[in-house]
Structures are given as C-alpha cells and as structure tokens.
Image: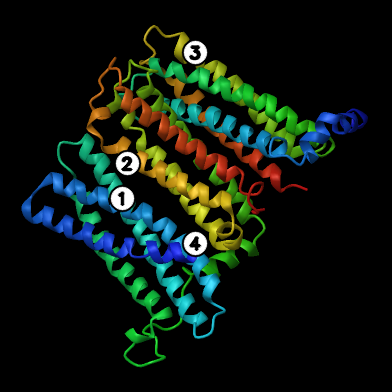
Amino acid sequence: MGLTIPHLHLLLNHVPTVGSVAAVGLLLLALVRRNDDLLRASFELMFVVALATLPVYLTGVAAGTAIEELEGVSAEAIRTHETAALLAFVWMQITGFFAWLALWQSRRLPKLPRATLGTVVLLSVITLALMGRAATIGGEIRHPEILATPGAVTVGAPTGWLQSTVIADFVTQYPWVWPAAEALHFLGLCLVLGVLLAVNLRILGAMKALSFASLHRLLPWGMLGFALNLTTGMLFFIAAASQYTENIAFLWKVIFLGLAGAHFLYLTVFSRTWGMNVGAEAAPLDKLVAAGGLGAWVGVIYWGRMLPFIGNAF
Amino acid sequence: MMALLSWLEATGFSTWVREGETIWAFPTILTLHTFGMGLLVGANAVIDLRLLGIGRRLPLAPLRALFPVMWGGFWLNLVTGSMLFAADATKRGTDPLYYTKLVFVAIGVAVIVALRRRVFDAAENPGVDGGSGKMLAAVSLATWTMAATTGRLLAYVS
C-alpha cells in the first residue's frame, strides 16, 4: 500500500472547510458568551487551519495533474476548482495572519483592540464562504451524483488575474520575476531566522538579562519574513508546480514548515515562556521545544536549499 | 590574473566542489553558505531593527550575545564562499556582480565592527544610544540587504 499525493489531498481536503466552520462557530460562541479563553481558542484554531490549508492546496495541484487525463474527468472542472481553491487559500492565509495578530495582541495588551477582533470576524466569515465554494466545486470533479442536472457544473470558467495560469504566465514571461522573488525569498529567510534565533536563544539560556516578553515584541517581524516567503514561495510553486509536486525535498520542506508554524504559535501564546522574567531560567522542556523550533527551521532551509540537488527543481 | 583564476579552477579541490557527484560537494557547501547568511544577516537585522526603534523597551546591552552569532555566520561564509569561488574562479573572478557583492560584504563587516565599538562597547549604558546608532543600523540593514540580494542574483548570471 502506498499513500499517493492525490490520496493525501482527499484525506486533507476537508480540514479547511470543517476547520473553518469549527473556528467561526467557536468565535461566535465566544462573542455571545463574552469568554476570552474561548475567543483565543478560536484564533488558535484559525491559525492552525490556515497552516493546514497549505498542504491541501499543494497536494491538490498534484491531484489535478494525476487525474486530468482520466476519462470522465473534466479538465475544466479541475481548473475551476483550482481557481476557487487559490482564492480561498489566499483569504485563508490573510485570516490566519490576523488571527495570529489577535493572539499576539491579546498577549501584550490588557484588552484586544476592537479593530482586530472585527477584522478577524469579517475575514473568517468570508474565508468560510469561499472555502465552502471551493470544496463544492471540487466535489463536482468526481461526484456526478451531487449535480442536479447530470453534466452541468455550478460555476462557469474562471476569470480574473488570481488564477494559476495567469500567475504562471506572469512569472515565466518576464526574466526578472523569478530572480527578484528568489532574492526576496532569501531576505525573508534572514528575517525569520534572525527573529527566531534571538527568541529561542533566550529560552535556551543566552541573553538572560532580557525578559521573554521584550523579545516577544519582535515576533511580527518574523511573521513579516514568513509572509514574504509564503508569497514568493507560492509564486515559484504556481509557476513550476511539477518540479515541486514530484520532489521529495519539497515534501520534507512542507513537513518542517508545518512544525515551524506550530512552534511559532507556541512562542506567541504559551504562558510558561511568556512568564520568563529578566534572569529567569527556562524549564528543560521549554528548552527542548526551543531547540526543536530552531531545528524545524534548519529543516525548512536545508530541504529548501536541497530542492534542486536531492529533488529535481531548477 | 586570468592564469591564476584558471589554475585555481583547475585544482583537484575546485574540480571536486564543482563536479563531484556527491551531496557533500557543491550542494552541501552552498547550503552551509545559506545558513551562514541566515545567521549573519538575520542576527544583524534584529540588532538593526532594535536600534531603529522597534521594541524600544528591549534592553540593548544583552543583544551583545548576537555578535558571536554574526561572526560565526561570517567565518562560515568566508570559508564556504571561498570554496564556491574556487570552483568557478574564472566565471566569478571576471563578474562585476561578484565584486559588487564583495564590496557590500566589506562595508557590512566594517559597519558591524563600528556598531560594536560605538554603540555596544562605548556607552556605559548602551540602552541610551545617540543618533550614530540609528545611522549605523540603517546603513547596516541596507548594506546586508544588498549583499544578500547580489549574492542570490549570482545564480542567474551566466
């Protein structure tokens, strides 16, 4: 038995939809009950769902390639689903970012600013709708039984600039786009690594004259680097998907990215590290987690750099 | 000059780095070079951002601990960078972009030394820094951004 990438897509593809429903439900419940713990839990869930959406999109592209030649499968339906999924993916990432910002602010401020809360509520509802739409269109690719009229699909052909073919054309049409995006990707890497080095080295025992809270202030800069790299990274993936979907190094990179993202959430919200005052020594378990977090980034960078050598990327 | 570059490129070591069909040759050296960049430019960015006013309540003096991280990255990249240069000496040694990168690295190193002396070592209480700290931080951030960018773009010159 071998688990193929298309199979992985089928396993993962309910996470963004069901996860968004759960997160939005939790969020609304928290607002009705005026419960801050519940509210933070909904933000955490939103962030995790956004993180989990990345492999759903990536495996989806591989799944589309694998079945588009099959009889009875409409290549147009796949493309329509892919475009709807890309739109939902972008909104999901923006929602995940604001959910993270809300968590970061709730740690630092006595009260979460209403503007942040309102933004997360609005974005998460939009994302939920778009994710439901993408999932519905996805279902129509292989499930003729759900269509009212056999052969009819509910959504027409995609238009606009936010589609993989348009983005791929943009990246490959101009010779400067790929190198420029690579340069930004490396600057983003420096920013993420620099911030996480400072924060994790403190937990590991360096710079004890700093409280954890003072370094926690830097986390948005790490997030900025990550956002830069998610954006440029998606440009590479969309422009040359096959060199990543069939690349073992890329699979490892995404796995380590998931671990690194979970660790970033831990640094943002966990109380044990947050409470480390000037001079405080971290517990051995927290040191282990800090070392593991840095290790995850080493994994991300190592497998990223090895994409053309162990894998087949150019 | 060209004869020297050709000799360097033809040595057994350079040939191994360039053509060795093992993960330990070019791929690993380039990966280590990437890690060195991350350590040097990343740790430097944290210090620069702090000096430019991000997280003002973050005491400056303890960030001294990031200097060994930067120097570690620098020496790692001096060694791995020299290896990568040797492997493609005739190409790199005649490429203006390569020398542009070296100039940025040289300025960047000088600025790090200046940051250490003027901002971290000079003041009794480095938390109170004057205008020179901000200026140096801005130059440092810009210079290392350019060094990393020109370095990355070397992959795209033929």
- Specify the subunit that label 3 lies on: B
**Which of the 4 quarters of the picture holds residue A111?**
top left
Residue bearing the label numbered 3: B118
Q: Are marks 4 and 1 in contact (CB under 8 Å)?
A: no
| Chain where mark 1 sits | A
Examine the rendered structure and indicate whether residue B36 appears above or below residue A114.
Answer: above
Q: Is residue A7 visible?
A: yes
Q: Which residue is mark 2?
A: A265
Circle 3 Cα neighbour tier, 10 Å, few/some/many (<14 / 14–19 / ≥20): some
**N-terminal-most mark, 4 or 1:** 4
- The foreground one among A21 and B153 is A21
* Secondary structure beneath label 3: helix
Label 3 to label 4: alpha-carbon separation = 64 Å
**Residue placed furthest toward the front:** A1
Q: Amino acid at mark 3?
A: Arg
Q: Which mark is drawn over residue A47?
A: 1
Dots 1, 2 in contact, CB < 8 A: yes
Do discs 3 and 1 share a chain?
A: no
The label shown at residue A1 is 4
